[in-house]
Image (cartoon, coloured by chain):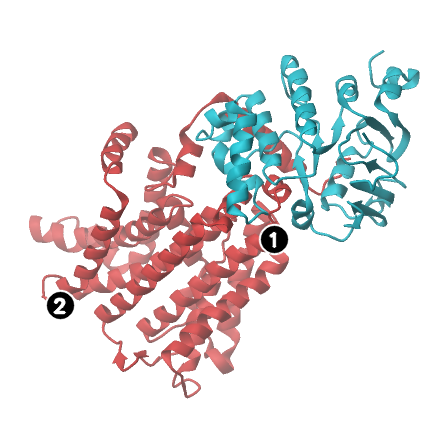
Chain colours: A red, B cyan
Amino acid sequence: MAGTFRRVADVFGRIPRWVYIVAALVLAIVFPMLEQAGLMQTLWLRLGTRTLVYVLLAVGLNLVLGETGLLHLGYVAFFAVGAYSTAILSSPRLGIHWNFWVIIVIATVLAMLFGFVIGMPTLRLRGDYLAIVTLAFGEITRMTFNNWESVTNGPGGIPGIFPPNLFGWVVDKPAEFFYLLLASVVLVVWLLNNLKKSRVGRAWNALREDEIASHHSGVRPTQVKMLAVVLSSGIAGLAGAIFAYYQQFINPTYFLFMQSTIVVCMVVLGGMGSIPGAIVGAVVLDATPEIIRQAFTQWLPDALGSDFLPGVQTALQTDFDRYRMLIFGLVIVLMVIFRPEGLLPDQLWRREVHDEDPRDQEHTRQHLFDFEEGEKDLEV
Amino acid sequence: MASEAQTPLLEFVGVHTHYGRIPILKDVNYRVYPGEIVCLLGGNASGKSTTMKTILGIVKPTTGKVFFDGEDITGLRTAERIKRGIATVPENRRLFPHLTVLENLEMGAYTRKDAEGIASDLERVFELYPRVFERRAQRAGTLSGGEQQMVAFARALMSRPRLIIMDEPSMGLAPALVDQSFDTIAEINKQGVSIFVVEQNATAALSIANRGYVLQNGQVVMEGAARELLENEELKRAYLGG
């Protein structure tokens, strides 16, 4: 199966890149029109809008996880910071109603600042330690919003977030949010793609490959990692702001640890360090469970009679969130077995996983050994 | 070639370093004059790696100073030192295994911003190592040990250094390649780059070096012209397998 996949992928690989970009953009632009033309249920447009939020998060996390190789498990915290800044500054909660542009900037910058503060102590840590600290940080952030009742209204959340007003264009329909998000995605992806090809992009990759060697080449590891963390935090903040506007209501349950995990899964599924991969990973992981639910609760019963697997129908209708995670797990397991480098891997990572040159393995062993020995060890 | 009247390119003055409370280097003084190859010998745990890290600024001396070309660089960051002209060939070479050879070389020029200068240095390096040019699109991890060694040298040259510090350049190489590797070092030196090399393979290192230091438990216990060290009876017993 894996072989067939690769042969098919090779055929598609010969089509130039810009064709894919144009096709994806056209598809995205046409998508909301289908709903407006009555060809598609609003449900799917809502799903598409949510997917675009995940796309933003996935490309943002990819910067840290994929390009720089830092296992960051608290990404949702920055999303929460963006969302809560928006909810507080544009809702009846405290009676504040600031301008959309001001809020977008505040949400992004505040999330970046948060990223900086968190990065300061944690970026010296490596691997597992960084994962543990970021995980804890994500939970601390959620707990703070959960308990800071005077401002965030605790578990009750903040309702009635005012719709954004972009120079007189009031964005309040799903289709409009879809386009607003699409524009943000295009902007962010363009920015990240340019960064990836720049000097700092090379430094991120070098850091992921060998921190000590990159240090010896003049890369300042903490500074360069910090840049990745701060930028990706800003992207999450931006996503959080638009998400809050779109939902019109937020509470701490939107920012559970599970959300961070889902975004990690999207990046891994798409292919670490690959921007198109992160986009595809987000689309596939967000849409697949919904498609399966629709298939078992609507399409299949419609086609085969309403008594088609009634147990599955009720299960999916009443307890979908749990099954959603089950489907996630299944997708990830299948991917790890058949396509460990991800759906649309970065060239770099493709090389890393599939080549089995013995000299490589030797190097990996060597590398592991060096890694364990650590830079600060008593090695004299 | 090295005259005592010259300003040393690299100079350690009374350097002490500690890891936590444990002293590593104890009152160490080194000098590397422009154009020299200086060799640092020493057994395990003698302070060789710490010397390398102190030159690069990864470890900071607790007391004492490090000078580069007459300037005090004790407080400077690694990146700043590289900009001033110090490059490394690290232990085990430490190429970026999944970056291509060309990308590895570009990382060598990371601290530089003069695109034309980098391009012309790239050409020079390719001329020097035609094999590296052949392999430029291949990822570094797939090269043989000898080729990786060349890429490591080439990468160090890409920052247009005045001093290259090398940590065990012969380590992990096939015996036939060791001599070749030292020839290459001598070759690089002829281009006007000073070299400070840490080696276990004392005979080979001293045969190309001008001077040498012997480090033991963090102290310099012997120093002198390479020729004299090669003939030193005590040293022969300890390091040269005589």
State the SS at label 2: helix
How far apart are the alpha carbons under marks 1 and 2?
49 Å
Classify B178 as above or below B150. Answer: above
Q: Residue at x 22, y 34 (%)?
A: A11
Q: Where does label 1 land, which residue?
A: A222
Q: Residue B67 appears at what percent x and percent y?
A: 80, 46
**A164 or B72: nearer the viewer:** B72
Residue hosting label 2: A36
Q: Residues within 10 Å of mark 1 (few under 14, many from 20)?
A: some
Kindly identify the residue that appears in the image at 61 percent across and 42 percent down. A217
* Neighbour tally class for label 2: few under 14, some 14-19, many 20 plus, Cα within 10 Å: few
The residue under label 1 is which amino acid type? Answer: Thr
Numbered mark located on residue A149 in the image: none
> Are tags 1 and 2 found on a single chain?
yes
User: Does residue B30 appear anywhere in the picture?
Assistant: yes
* Kind of residue at badge 2: Gln
Q: Position of residue B121 (x, y in %)?
A: 55, 37
The residue located at (21%, 68%) in the rendering is A175
| Quadrant in which the C terminus of chain A appears | top right
Name the spot of residue B212 as percent of width and height, x first: 83, 27
Count every numbered label the image shows and give the total.
2
Query: Would residue A154 be found to the left or right of residue A56 on screen?
Result: right
Tag 1 subunit: A
Q: Is residue A174 left or right of residue B155?
A: left
Of the residues tagged 1 and 2, which is closer to the observer? Answer: 1
What residue do we see at 91% from left, 30% from top? B221
Q: Is residue A299 left or right of residue B236?
A: left
